[in-house]
Image (spheres, rainbow, N blue to C red):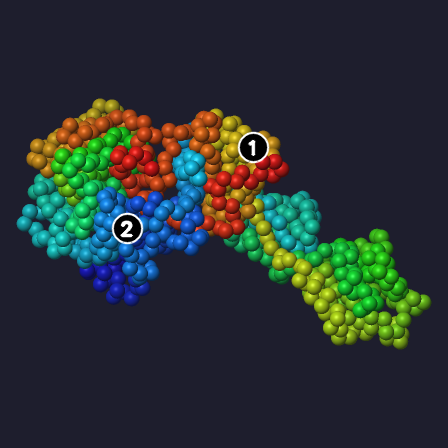
């Protein structure tokens, strides 16, 4: 019955047949490449919803309603779906006034088109990602590079203007798509030259070379010795914490010496750094504690018979507590694996407990350019100054941002704190991200704002395109009077 | 009915969204939404009367779309004199509103659907309670209620896709207008003309809706190369306009051409005024405006201070309500 390429929408009894690229009579459902989709409406965070006192929804609850209207919940209009005026030098699409605690506030809402943007990705793993400066590729195209390691994590830089517009057309498009997916919380496959292959998804554990990384290590092997020496003392004669960076040995370590742990005659195959700390014991891999070791005894040479004794108790454990083995030396001073005694099981569990879940975290970083700022004020530099002076709060889809000190408005935002699918793109290629500037109406006038285009919040409400979302409890409310999220000074 | 039955027969799961009925965050207005119907409702008067009126509105609202859809095929047929009439109260109101035009132009009752729905909801509210004022705004087609001594001020938007006011109308209780409607090729409905906006005041919202459609169709430059037209059915297979060519883009126009198109529309508007079908109309094309029928109501056409006018937001608000008595919110 549906003729040609139209899609039948059955969301309401009008039963529109919608042609590709068109919307139905309601403007809410559309045919996108033959699929019926709900067109993403303009997103409005509704603080009331997160408080549980939903806006009246009589029919859903089936309850009788007496006709009384609730008093106004707090609403913050995000820039998602607001559109943009780029590249026109004209006021932002939505400049909305609201009263907060008796103060007239203005929120300038726009979607920025960012050529200068990228993602800083932190991957919680000690596994080797690849050498510093190695290219990170998606679909074979260079989309970023390995920057450095942080404590327990590997850092990647993805995107940036040089990949978006500085390389080939294909490189730009793949970079744009990769950024879009990363920022919208979708899984992205990446490979690193002379390194690992990864699946990265914001807020999820990384998958490194096909294996899911569930926990971060508690510290390096040496740090682990320091943290747990007291708990081991008296219950075991020797502990080796296996690590691809620094493997720790209790009896030789400063912490063991301090407690009076006797020498055990243990010998580690590796390069000793300082007492009880060994480098190059193992390479990175998918074995014990992020090393290539599967048999822990392979890192031990024979015990020194002058110091060791039969019955010596040895615990070997990885920095995540996930891998462990307990041995006792036999008459020939050879380690023989035994059941882990209950008094040690607790400490191994404690190591594991102290290993936080390994996650990929994605910070979107971008700079608000001249024309975007011009949409806010006739004199763009005044907006920059106002942001630096914390008179203007910047949010990204309602999420708090960190404003990098110095010139311009260069900000970072954690993408999982933003509403779903907050990012879009233009074929330039460049990313489209929501950005909101909130400030006092009086301050807005002072900085040369487009006060003639300020409209009350209530004027946006009748729009059928409005989508209400509960505000996130872990985000500060964008309109609350606390100063803007700043780095070092407020 | 045929359309509904067809979908059921094909075994599809009907995921009918329930109507949305809620108060807006300002705590004063009601938002009623069902499929393509989207109403903003506000009543003024005693608190109890407002409650009673809102309750009447939410009791009436949920069946409206189904009623209309049950006669949708008929409502999409041209309203020729002597043709068959629909049964539903709203459908008959639509048919009645387009009846004066059936013998001289192509028109279907769908030309008055938005206004007719607004009128229906307003009428159940005013029957249920004594209200000093009330309005039901159905995406820019507005039904008004005014007790003696009251008035509304309504802003007019030049281009629904780029809201900025080009004028305002003050409707006093002494004036007979209780309906305001706006038509434009840029709006949600198709138009045969090129008007950026035609706003009409008439005795009821359905009558205004139909007339705005007719006048907007007449603001035209037939055969002009800069006007891109496409058969309506190519855009929407079920459009009541079938193979009629509807406007989908308008290129550069010379000043003389703008005047010519506006004059064509204004001439139709004047004849509708003379026939007593409408009270006033404001026509807008490329920043040029023409008012017809003033000063029956007080109509200001021209630049307004955008702050003082409150500013509207979306294409859904082809005309937006401004409550001059309370000032801006």
Q: Provide the secondary structure element on which disc 1 rests.
A: helix
Residue A275 drawn at (x, y percent): 86, 55
Residue at the spot 30% in from the left edge and 34% down from the top edge: B327
Residue at numbered disc 2: B32
Query: The disc numbered 2 marks a residue on which chain?
Result: B
Residue at the spot 78% in from the left edge and 75% down from the top edge: A338
Residue B69 drawn at (x, y percent): 20, 56
Q: Provide the secondary structure element on which disc 2 rests.
A: strand
Residue at the spot 56% in from the left edge and 36% down from the top edge: A410
Seen from this angle, which residue lies furthest top?
B256
Q: Quadrant of residue A300?
A: bottom right
Residue A317 drawn at (x, y percent): 75, 64
For residue B285, above or below residue A12: above
Query: The disc numbered 1 marks a residue on which chain?
Result: A
Q: Answer few, some or many: residues within 10 Å of disc 2's Cα (few below 14, many 20 plus, some between 14 and 19).
A: many
For residue A304, above or below residue B35: below
Instruction: Please give the count of numbered marks on the rendered protein.
Output: 2
Q: In this view of the protein, can residue A14 be seen by the observer?
A: no
Residue at the spot 29% in from the left edge and 48% down from the top edge: B30
Residue A135 drawn at (x, y percent): 63, 46
Residue at numbered disc 1: A388
Question: Marks 2 and 1, how far apart in space?
Answer: 43 Å
Seen from this angle, which residue lies furthest left?
B82
* Quarter the N terminus of chain A occupies: bottom left
B57 or A412: nearer the eye? B57
Q: Answer few, some or many: residues within 10 Å of disc 1's Cα (few below 14, many 20 plus, some between 14 and 19).
A: many
Seen from this angle, which residue lies furthest right?
A306
Q: In this view of the protein, can residue B323 be seen by the observer?
A: yes
* Quarter the C terminus of chain A occupies: top right
């Amino acid at each position: 019955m549906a003729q040609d390429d139209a899609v039948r929408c059955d969301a309401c009894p009008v039963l529109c047949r919608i042609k590709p690229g068109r919307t139905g009579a309601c403007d809410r459902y559309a045919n996108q490449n033959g699929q019926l989709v709900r067109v993403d409406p303009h997103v409005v965070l509704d603080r009331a919803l997160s408080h549980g006192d939903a806006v009246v929804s009589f029919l859903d609850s089936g309850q009788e309603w007496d006709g009384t209207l609730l008093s106004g919940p707090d609403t913050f209009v995000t820039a998602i779906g607001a559109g943009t005026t780029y590249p026109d030098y004209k006021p932002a699409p939505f400049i909305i006034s609201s009263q907060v605690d008796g103060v007239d506030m203005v929120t300038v809402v726009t979607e920025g088109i960012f050529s200068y943007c990228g993602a800083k990705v932190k991957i919680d793993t000690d596994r080797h990602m690849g050498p510093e400066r190695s290219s990170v590729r998606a679909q074979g195209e260079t989309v970023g590079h390995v920057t450095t390691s942080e404590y327990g994590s590997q850092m990647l830089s993805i995107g940036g203007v040089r990949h978006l517009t500085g390389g080939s057309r294909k490189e730009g498009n793949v970079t744009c798509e990769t950024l879009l997916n990363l920022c919208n919380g979708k899984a992205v496959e990446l490979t690193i030259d002379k390194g690992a292959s990864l699946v990265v998804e914001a807020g999820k554990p990384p998958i490194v070379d096909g294996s899911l990384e569930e926990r971060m290590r508690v510290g390096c092997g040496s740090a682990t010795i320091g943290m747990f020496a007291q708990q081991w003392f008296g219950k075991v004669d020797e502990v080796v914490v296996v690590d691809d960076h620094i493997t720790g040995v209790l009896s030789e370590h400063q912490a063991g010496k301090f407690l009076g742990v006797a020498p055990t005659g243990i010998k580690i195959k590796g390069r000793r750094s300082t007492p009880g700390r060994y480098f190059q014991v193992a390479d990175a891999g998918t074995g014990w504690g992020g090393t290539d070791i599967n048999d822990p005894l392979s890192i031990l040479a024979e015990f020194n018979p002058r110091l060791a004794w039969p019955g010596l108790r040895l615990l070997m454990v990885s920095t995540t507590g996930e891998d462990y083995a307990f041995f006792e030396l036999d008459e020939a001073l050879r380690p023989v694996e035994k059941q882990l005694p209950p008094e040690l099981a607790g400490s191994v569990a404690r190591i594991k407990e102290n290993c936080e879940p390994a996650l990929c975290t994605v910070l979107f970083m971008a700079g608000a350019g001249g024309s975007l700022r011009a949409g806010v004020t006739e004199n763009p530099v005044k907006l920059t100054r106002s942001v630096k002076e914390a008179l203007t709060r910047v949010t990204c889809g309602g999420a708090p941002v960190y404003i990098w000190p110095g010139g311009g408005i260069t900000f970072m935002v954690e993408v999982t704190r933003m509403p779903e699918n907050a990012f879009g793109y233009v074929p330039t290629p460049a990313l489209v991200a929501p950005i909101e500037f909130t400030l006092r109406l009086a301050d807005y006038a002072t900085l040369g704002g487009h006060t003639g285009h300020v409209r009350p919040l209530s004027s946006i409400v009748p729009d059928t395109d409005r989508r209400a979302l509960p505000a996130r409890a872990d985000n500060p409310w964008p309109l609350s009077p606390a100063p803007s999220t700043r780095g070092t000074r407020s | 009915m045929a359309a509904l039955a067809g979908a059921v027969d094909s075994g599809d799961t009907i995921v009918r969204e329930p109507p949305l009925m809620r108060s807006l965050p300002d705590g004063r207005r009601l938002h009623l939404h069902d499929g393509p119907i989207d109403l903003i409702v506000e009543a003024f008067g005693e608190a109890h009367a407002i409650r009673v009126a809102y309750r009447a509105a939410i009791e009436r609202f949920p069946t409206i779309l189904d009623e209309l859809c049950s006669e949708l095929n008929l409502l999409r047929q041209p309203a020729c004199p002597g043709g068959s009439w629909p049964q539903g109260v709203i459908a008959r109101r639509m048919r009645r509103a387009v009846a004066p035009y059936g013998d001289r132009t192509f028109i279907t009752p769908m030309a008055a659907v938005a206004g007719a729905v607004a009128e229906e909801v307003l009428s159940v509210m005013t029957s249920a309670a004594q209200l000093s004022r009330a309005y039901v705004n159905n995406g820019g087609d507005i039904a008004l209620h005014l007790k003696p001594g009251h008035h509304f001020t309504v802003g007019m938007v030049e281009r629904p896709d780029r809201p900025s006011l080009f004028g305002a109308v003050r409707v006093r209780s002494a004036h007979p207008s209780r309906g305001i409607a706006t038509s434009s090729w840029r709006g949600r409905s198709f138009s045969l003309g090129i008007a950026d906006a035609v706003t009409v005041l008439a005795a009821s919202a359905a009558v205004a809706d139909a007339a705005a459609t007719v006048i907007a169709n007449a603001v035209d430059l037939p055969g002009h190369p800069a006007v891109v037209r496409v058969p309506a059915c190519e855009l929407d297979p079920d459009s009541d306009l079938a193979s009629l060519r509807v406007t989908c883009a308008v290129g550069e126009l010379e000043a003389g051409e703008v005047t010519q198109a506006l004059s064509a529309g204004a001439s139709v508007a004047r004849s509708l005024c003379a026939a007593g079908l409408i009270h006033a109309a404001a026509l807008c094309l490329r920043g040029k405006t023409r008012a017809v029928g003033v000063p029956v109501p007080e109509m200001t056409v021209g630049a307004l201070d955008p702050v003082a006018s409150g500013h509207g937001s979306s294409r859904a608000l082809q005309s937006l309500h401004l409550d001059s008595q309370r000032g801006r919110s």
